[in-house]
Image (cartoon, coloured by chain):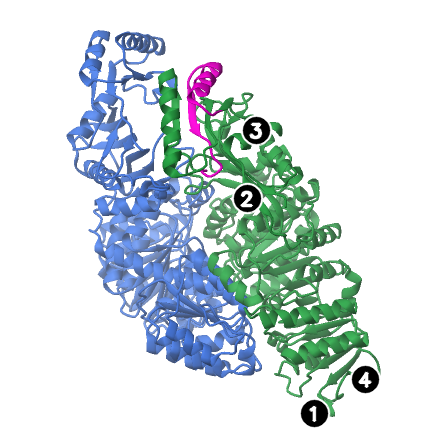
Chain colours: A green, B blue
């Protein structure tokens, strides 16, 4: 990732626009209008063979006539003309081009894809970087380099600020800016990368995160083409203390279909995206509202210490809803220290509530000092990590400027996060002007606070873990694959150190009987074949056999069943019957973008129907798996309920880590592992893998 | 419920204010200011012994000097003075009083409760109605009768409209009004009932719903003291086509604690509240934002026919996020008819997407007609039930008035719900002025649409079911209760027609052996005692016994165990071993407010640890239970997965309905039923109840 090569996009000395228009509402007119309006200080060259002047600037027929080779060229002309213009720029030593036209790889047409490839090759051969095609362009409100045609900027004051919005979509590079402005927040960058043909959204995000002004990076993604860059970008951001919040759309089948026709995005498996972003300390949000809602909190330099919330309001209902919202958001209502309660009782009227949430009641209207008076008392209480003060209604009779001033001072003294809820626009503005993050409603304020706290925790966890080892995805040469039969699969796992059920693969009834005698006690008898993975459904499993005649009959029946199925018959497995407390599973497969992923959770036959699984990314340590197991629905049962013994989650975690390492190191490469069931025993008693299917790459 | 008696609150001819103040920012000053400002046409009497004139009106020392007995009296004075004022009003024939002071039953103090009781008794004895105490008051913007001290109304234009907000909390009677105004919606009623000492929030809501102007009723509740009134209110509302949306706060433990100190609310079991509101066709929302978000949709008179959504935007990202949001909200992305696709392909540029969601791309900026041109084509397609049109960015270059006009016409033609997403304030206003429900972001717009559609479906379902039979909760005389032992519990269920396991209660080893012979085949042997309900934990259960000696040993061991436990020993149950496909449960108990409730779901020993349950309200029919079972997590397994037979959910549903009817009719009254496990067999094979505990009332 060469961030230096992106500098001409963000801080160019000279810009030409090929396809410039006099009309500021045309795509070719807007960038010129914006460069003017937002005070770009560099040189600007409109190019259009039909004009001599455009928007008050001298216009040139082609790159030929310019007094210099421009650093950045914005290409507005469509189709083949765009391709020609890119080649022309490349030939002349232009450093950076933005291609705005659509109709390339985002369409289903092979011609579109070929044209895009053509442009990229020309650019790369010349060492020129290319943003787009199918992009709305870029904006830097720090220096006025606004090479975008977004309609949003027709009404944009261009207030610079410590936030960057980076997006594959044009609209989503601009919409958050409008929302942030409504919250009184300035934004420096609005960067849309379109089809990511050369410069990717992650590269551009890394460039923005490298700007010392930036404290918050908001990403809109429809695909993650380069996990290596994503990880590098997160590293750069966190090194600089920049928070990264991401909205990755196309979570659902319907959304992924829409994304394919929008930016031609390759589908990412959504739970892999969840795990990847979490691993990198990037907070994933579900929609645009939550992309921006906590923005003001990120800019304050607060370092949250915990999740214990104190809520204060003059409205009892706000207190009730705040308590509900805190619980839903995973925050705790702090239990204030007794001294705090005593001090509050002295100050507040008897019908006020001095337990947290603190309800000042309508008494606040009669005595505006109440709020300011209690703040120093609460500031001394170490039971509180964060604060929400709700003003569902303020205005005449309330000294809002005093509230805002005293709360801002309080925030400065304590250094603890505080957020205000105020839905009346002028009241909210007053709090925002005092530097207090303010959202309309208590639940929104608490959600934003919880998001900020969770995000800080996420980054801490990400920093403590080894960096992921993703590389640039390579087009995979389609090689053969081979499904190992159960005996081979178990052998492979045993070799890697996992605990498998004692068993024998037998090719005759006599061998099976001998195996039963050797294993001792009741056994399971199962048909073994790489052709058939769902044995039970084909009636190829007999359980709890403990007599010679039973074994002989079972062998015969299974052999016959295979003949009827016309399936490959590798023999019969005779395995000791094992008891466990719960059926678990460990799975693994290769994501086309992110490589090996491991899944762990409840096993048994209803894995698909009643999924209770967590997806994890290698390299995996036992501790990572243990944390993940704690988030399973069945976690209470694993921990032991109603007097039952806790189960051996450490052993299960070690097993998952071993599978993870197998996925990374085994040669020939393992394509997938499906361990199910793994019978988990009580603490200290380990587990036994009873069935498994492994698929390996078949070289050549 | 006498709605006639509430008329003086909403449409009084004369109003007196006891404790009137010259200062409009005092509680006693605000109502006078508002009556003036909002144009109340009736007579107004300030009462304050220290003044002769207040806010330009003649002031009276007491009720004595007034030229008439006022219909409505607002009492602002606190504590004992408030009680005295109530008694004075009652004595003089006042019809209605509003008591604003706090410090009564919402505090923990017995004196506060006693004072409140005193006021209520005085009012009731005189046939006078009382709102409050601890209330912010009432507002009717239809006639200017604004007897509230809410600060919200200092900035309120008082625009009348078809919405009523009714709330136990003062702030929450007003905050929604501010939010609705920001959405351009007028509101007629803002009614706060405070402690609900006499007039309840449900009674007041019924009065508002009876006003022919009202189309939407928004409720804020912290408790539901009167289920009978709630049901009656819902009936009145639905008869008139009024939608009722409720925010019942105090969902969580923390929230319920806060509610107790706010309005002294009795805790309602939250899942009972869910079921109650659903049963009545009242949509429950989680927070204030969703209380108001769909308001505009409710006012259009649309009758949604289905859940198939068409999303249209000039932004591909909006299309992707709309598809995600629709899936999350339970809507389907409609598959447009082939003729529609052909017609759209003709109109739109090749890089646009004519599959739904329809992405017009930035081509819309070049050709503003695109949107208006496609509307008539989509209007003809019967595959679409509802529409979302997203304008993430509009402004210069976009003919927003034309978009708004053509979409409003489209909505008129199709009669199908349509919602707009536009986050820029002036753009949103333009769409709202054209009568189009508009929310800032696509996900919010689609959530609102989905809420409206779900609500319409909910009301239809509620109408098709028999009305609930809740009565006014009576203080329950604490009578005795008796836990039936397992044999008695099973007998009671068998008598009611449920299928129980064949078994015998035996008082000796010999009896147990005889029972085993009679039952034939393997049996379970279980200690029977009304003292001990968790038998397994005390090792009082032996399974799969099938030999005389085993039975004898088991009997002896269990008898000894009881002696050690010093528990009552009612004998030993010998029961046939039964196989089922899945362990289910049926529970029932009596809610102190709503009476009998039934719970059905997964059984087994992890009912509490891994709950997968639905709560239902009598009277129950099998069809109700079958619908509920479909919402269980284990529903796919009940339906049959991976080639397994479907289970006998009809039989389970009948059983739950029988338990429900038992809870309603059995004498002595049944206090609770706990059937677990119920072994469910495959379709047509029924079920067997293997264990049960019933607790009955012990009369006298």
Taking the magenta stretch, the answer to whether it contains residue A596 is no
Q: Chain of mark 2?
A: A
Q: Residues within 10 Å of mark 4 (few under 14, many from 20)?
A: some
Q: Residues within 10 Å of mark 3 (few under 14, many from 20)?
A: some
Please state which of the two labelled residues, at mark 2 or mark 3, is closer to the viewer.
3
Q: Which residue is mark 2?
A: A331
- In percent of width and height, residue B542 lies at 33, 16
Q: Earlier in the sequence, mark 2 or mark 3?
A: 2
Q: Which residues are magenta?
A: A506-533
Secondary structure state at the residue bearing disc 3: helix
Q: Earlier in the sequence, mark 2 or mark 1?
A: 1
Please state which of the two labelled residues, at mark 4 or mark 2, is closer to the viewer.
4
Q: Image quadrant of residue A129? A: bottom right
Q: Same chain for marks 4 and 2?
A: yes
Cα separation, mark 1 vs mark 4, equals 16 Å
Q: Earlier in the sequence, mark 4 or mark 2?
A: 4
- In percent of width and height, residue A161 lies at 70, 65
Q: Which residue is mark 4?
A: A66
Taking the magenta stretch, the answer to whether it contains residue A508 is yes
**Label number found at residue A491:** 3
- In percent of width and height, residue B556 lies at 30, 7
Secondary structure state at the residue bearing disc 1: loop
Q: Earlier in the sequence, mark 4 or mark 3?
A: 4
Q: Image quadrant of residue A96? A: bottom right
Please state which of the two labelled residues, at mark 3 or mark 1, is closer to the viewer.
3
Cα separation, mark 4 vs mark 3, equals 71 Å
**Label number found at residue A50:** 1
Left or right of A456 on screen, residue B2: left
């Amino acid at each position: 990732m060469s961030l230096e090569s992106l500098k001409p996009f963000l801080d160019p000395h000279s810009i030409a626009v090929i396809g410039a228009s006099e009309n500021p509402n045309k795509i070719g007119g807007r960038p010129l209008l914006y460069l003017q309006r937002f005070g770009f200080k560099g040189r600007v060259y409109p190019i259009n063979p039909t004009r001599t002047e455009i928007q008050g600037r001298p216009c040139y027929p082609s790159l030929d006539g310019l007094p210099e080779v421009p650093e950045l060229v914005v290409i507005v002309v469509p189709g083949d003309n765009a391709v020609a213009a890119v080649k022309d720029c490349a030939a002349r030593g232009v450093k950076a081009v933005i291609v705005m036209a659509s109709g390339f790889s985002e369409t289903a047409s092979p011609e579109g894809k070929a044209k895009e490839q053509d442009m990229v090759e020309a650019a790369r051969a010349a060492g020129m970087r290319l943003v787009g095609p199918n992009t709305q362009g870029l904006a830097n409100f720090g220096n006025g380099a606004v090479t975008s045609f977004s309609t949003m900027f027709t009404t944009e004051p261009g207030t610079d600020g410590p936030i960057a919005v980076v997006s594959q979509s044009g609209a989503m590079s601009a919409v958050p800016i409008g929302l942030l402005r409504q919250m009184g927040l300035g934004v420096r960058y609005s960067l849309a990368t379109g089809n990511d043909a050369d410069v990717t959204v992650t590269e551009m995000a890394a460039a923005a995160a490298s700007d010392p002004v930036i404290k918050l990076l908001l990403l809109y993604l429809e695909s993650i083409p380069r996990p290596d860059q994503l990880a590098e970008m997160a590293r750069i951001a966190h090194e600089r203390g920049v928070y990264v919040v991401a909205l990755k759309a196309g979570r659902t089948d319907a959304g992924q279909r829409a994304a394919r026709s929008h930016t031609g995005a390759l589908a990412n498996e959504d739970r892999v995206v969840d795990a990847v972003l979490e691993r990198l300390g990037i907070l994933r949000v579900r929609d645009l509202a939550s992309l921006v809602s906590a923005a003001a909190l990120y800019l304050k330099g607060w370092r949250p210490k915990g999740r214990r919330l104190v809520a204060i309001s003059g409205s009892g209902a706000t207190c009730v809803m705040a308590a509900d919202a805190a619980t839903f958001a995973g925050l705790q209502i702090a239990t204030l220290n007794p001294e705090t309660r005593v001090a509050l009782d002295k100050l507040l009227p008897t019908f006020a509530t001095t337990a947290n949430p603190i309800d000042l009641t309508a008494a606040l209207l009669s005595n505006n000092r109440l709020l300011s008076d209690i703040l120093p008392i609460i500031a001394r209480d170490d039971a509180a990590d964060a604060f929400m003060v709700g003003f569902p209604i303020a205005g005449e009779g309330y000294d809002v400027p005093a509230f805002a001033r005293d709360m801002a001072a309080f925030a400065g003294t304590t250094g603890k996060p505080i957020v205000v809820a105020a839905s009346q626009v002028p009241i909210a503005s007053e709090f925002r002007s005092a530097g207090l993050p303010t959202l309309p409603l208590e639940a929104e304020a608490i959600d934003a606070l919880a998001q900020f706290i969770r995000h800080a925790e996420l980054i801490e966890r990400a920093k403590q873990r080894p960096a992921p080892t993703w590389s640039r995805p390579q087009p995979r040469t389609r090689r053969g694959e081979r499904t190992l039969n159960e005996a081979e699969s178990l052998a492979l796992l045993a070799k890697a150190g996992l605990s498998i059920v004692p068993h024998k693969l037998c090719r005759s009834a006599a061998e099976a009987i001998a195996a039963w005698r050797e294993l001792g006690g009741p056994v399971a008898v199962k048909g073994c074949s790489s052709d058939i993975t769902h044995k039970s459904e084909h009636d190829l499993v007999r359980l709890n056999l403990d007599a010679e005649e039973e074994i002989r009959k079972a062998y015969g029946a299974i052999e016959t069943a295979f003949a009827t199925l016309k399936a490959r018959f590798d023999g019969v497995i005779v395995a000791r019957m094992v008891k466990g407390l719960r059926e678990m599973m460990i799975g693994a497969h290769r994501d086309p973008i992110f490589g090996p992923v491991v899944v762990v959770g409840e096993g048994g036959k209803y894995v698909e129907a009643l999924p209770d699984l967590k997806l994890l990314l290698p390299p995996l340590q036992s501790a990572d798996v243990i944390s993940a197991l704690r988030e399973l629905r069945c976690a209470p049962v694993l921990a032991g309920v109603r007097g039952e013994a806790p189960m051996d989650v450490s052993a299960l975690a070690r097993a998952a880590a071993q599978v993870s390492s197998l996925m990374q190191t085994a040669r020939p490469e393992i394509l997938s592992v499906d361990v199910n069931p793994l019978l988990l025993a009580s603490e200290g008693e380990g587990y036994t893998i009873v069935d498994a299917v492994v698929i390996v790459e078949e070289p050549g």
